[in-house]
Image (cartoon, helix red, strand yellow):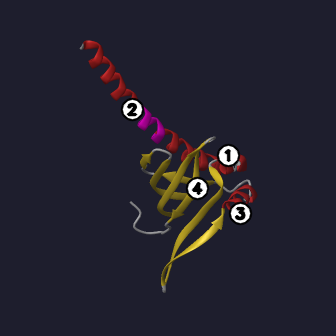
Amino acid sequence: MKKLFVFSLLALISSSIQAQTAEEEVKAVIESLFDGMRAKNTEMIASAFDPKALMQTIVVSENGAETRSNAVQDFVARIGQSPAETQLDERITDYQIKVDGDLASAWTPYEFYVNGEFSHCGVNSFQLVRMAEGWKIVYIIDTRRKEDCV
């Protein structure tokens, strides 16, 4: 009976550790993306993404909201080509990560700074898939605004 209890307890602890580990792995991928941006390390940025990943941003105009798409390769190239003296710093203020098997979703409010000056804020919504080489971002969409940043 004691052995069954100990085995059950270990199984319960093991399953909760695995779920927590997946969330930590997802967070690490997102952090590596923004660490790569700050360092202008294009290999680090690109390695966070699946090569077929989609990037979109929501733009609000007088006609309402619409989405604009961006290729990951273009995003990586723009970061790599930005002037050396330009510091880009996206600061994630919270992580809400959900994992189900090989699918993860992350909701990350952020503040963006250029050369230490506030530029804008918003929220990133990431979709990640655990692939053979680890978690990869397959989709990201974000909002951007200059006011009502919390």
Whether residue 118 is visible: no
Q: Secondary structure at mark 2?
A: helix
Pick the quarter of the image with the C terminus.
Answer: bottom left
> Which of the marked residues, 2 or 4, is nearer the chain's N terminus?
2
Question: In the figure, residue 71 lies in which quadrant?
Answer: bottom right
- Whether pointer 2 and pointer 1 mark residues with C-beta atoms closer than 8 Å, the reply is no
- Whether pointer 1 and pointer 4 mark residues with C-beta atoms closer than 8 Å, the reply is no
The image position of residue 29, as x and y in percent, is: 56, 45
The image position of residue 105, as x and y in percent, is: 46, 53
Q: Residues within 10 Å of mark 2 (few under 14, many from 20)?
A: few
The residue that mark 3 highlights is 74
> Which of the marked residues, 2 or 1, is nearer the chain's N terminus?
2
> Which of the marked residues, 1 or 4, is nearer the chain's N terminus?
1
Q: Nearer the viewer, mark 4 or mark 3?
A: 4
Residue at (44%, 33%) from the top-left corner? 18
**Toward the viewer: 54 or 37?**
54
Instruction: Compute the Cα span from label 1 to label 3.
Output: 15 Å
Q: Which residues are magenta?
A: 16-23
The residue that mark 2 highlights is 15
The image position of residue 16, as x and y in percent, is: 37, 33
The residue that mark 4 highlights is 138
Q: Amino acid at mark 1?
A: Met
The residue that mark 1 highlights is 44
